[in-house]
Amino acid sequence: MTTATLAEALPLPCGAVLPNRIAKAAMSEQLGDRSNRPTQQLDRLYERWGRDGAGLVITGNVMIDRRHVGEPRNVVVEDARDLPALRRWADAGRAGGSALWVQVNHPGRQALRIAGAHPVGPSAVAPKLPGAVTPRALTPHEIEQIVARFATTAAVVRDAGFDGVQLHGAHGYLISQFLSPRANVREDEWGGDAERRRRFALEVVGAVRAAVGDDFAVGIKLNSADFQRGGFSEDESVEVVAALAEAGVDLVEISGGTYESPAMMGGSDGDSAPQRASTAAREAYFLDYAERVRERVPGLPLMVTGGFRSLEGMAAAIGSGACDVVGIGRPLALHPDAVGELLAGTRARVDAGKRGLGVRRLDSAIDLFWHTRQLQRIGRGREPWAGEHALQTFAAFLLTNGWGAARRRRGG
């Protein structure tokens, strides 16, 4: 049994070292400009998080194709055109000593509707979401082009000075869609059975690794399961993790669910994942699954995000060996200095709170947008404001995004 502590450094297979075991998990900031380019608001936000002392800070969604974005004002990195702004962002986030990774993503069928573009996916199967449209099934050539785009984006952010990338393979985005037997009903080399469904994820990892080299960190966020009948199962997920480890990933972050079955939203910050009693007692939603992965792939570094609130619970998860890194998301939108206080022992817990109007169909979206607005306040150089009422949030939500986009809003 490990005796690791939260303050202990974590060496990764690529040779990089995380200064400690607490990570700021990805949250969608929506702080790009109208052309989806990085802004100084992102610099301010990540400088604030970076100086707080987290061992790892992961950005929100950075898209690989400006024709396909998941949320308004996602940053898009297709090539080196925005390298100066990306370098400024990397410098700001790394100044305090944190490792700074970019979450790289393609939304697939969960894309916003953009003039002249149409959502795409592994198959022409629409998600069961309000306002969703049936995506166009990608051709094999287009799939290969998307794999190359992931590699190009990773190489650009490496050149900009970031410390690593995290591929978003969870929450119903494109990599997750290929893994799902509900979203991927192909019968060619990209689908048809579990081995072929995982090919896209493995091809992306391989292309990214070839583009960035052996000494640059490459992680992935992966669902433990989709929590949908006939969807991506826990058994299949374990085998995917084993294949990813062989492909050379440095860290797997465990999550779960899709927007159709949002296990990543509830608890004190929105998750509704089914929990065993032991998992609930230990706070984190996916620790039981992490222990199963640990048995199957003993040497692979694991990160668990979702439900961690107390210093005691975080320390126990690391000390037991169930995971190597604990991820904290929405609580750091309200308490951006909490990681340093946790590591110093001056804070016993950190909570996100939950905002809503008591309307089940609205409240998860309101709560998520409330926290997004806190990120945007920090980006403008202001402090988070816990006093914003859910009605104010809902009004701003409708004004800036509309209900259809609201249900698809997520960072990490």
Image (cartoon, rainbow, N blue to C red):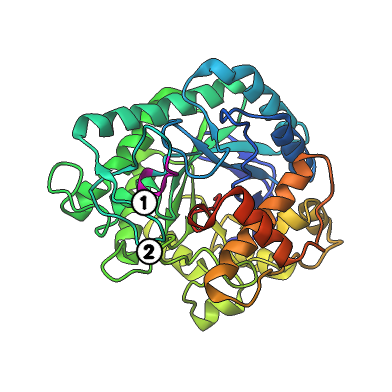
Q: Nearer the viewer, residue 157 or 130?
A: 130
- CA–CA distance between discs 2 and 1? 9 Å
Residue beneath the point at 74% across and 40% down: 45
Looking at the image, residue 320 lies above or below residue 39: below
- Residue matched to label 1: 176
Q: Amino acid at mark 2?
A: Asp
Of label 2 and label 1, which has the lower sequence position?
A: 1
The answer to whether the residues at label 2 and label 1 have Cβ atoms under 8 Å apart is: yes
Looking at the image, residue 80 lies above or below residue 37: above
Identify the residue at the far bottom of this view: 277
- Residue matched to label 2: 226
Where residue 32 appears, as percent x and y from the top left, is 62, 34
- Which residue range is magenta in the image? 108-113
Identify the residue at the far left of this view: 187
Q: Secondary structure at mark 2?
A: loop
Q: Is residue 339 magenta?
A: no
Residue beneath the point at 52% across and 17% down: 80
In the rendered image, is residue 330 in sight? no
Q: Sort mark 1 into few (<14), some (14-19) or many (20+) by Cα contacts within 10 Å.
A: many
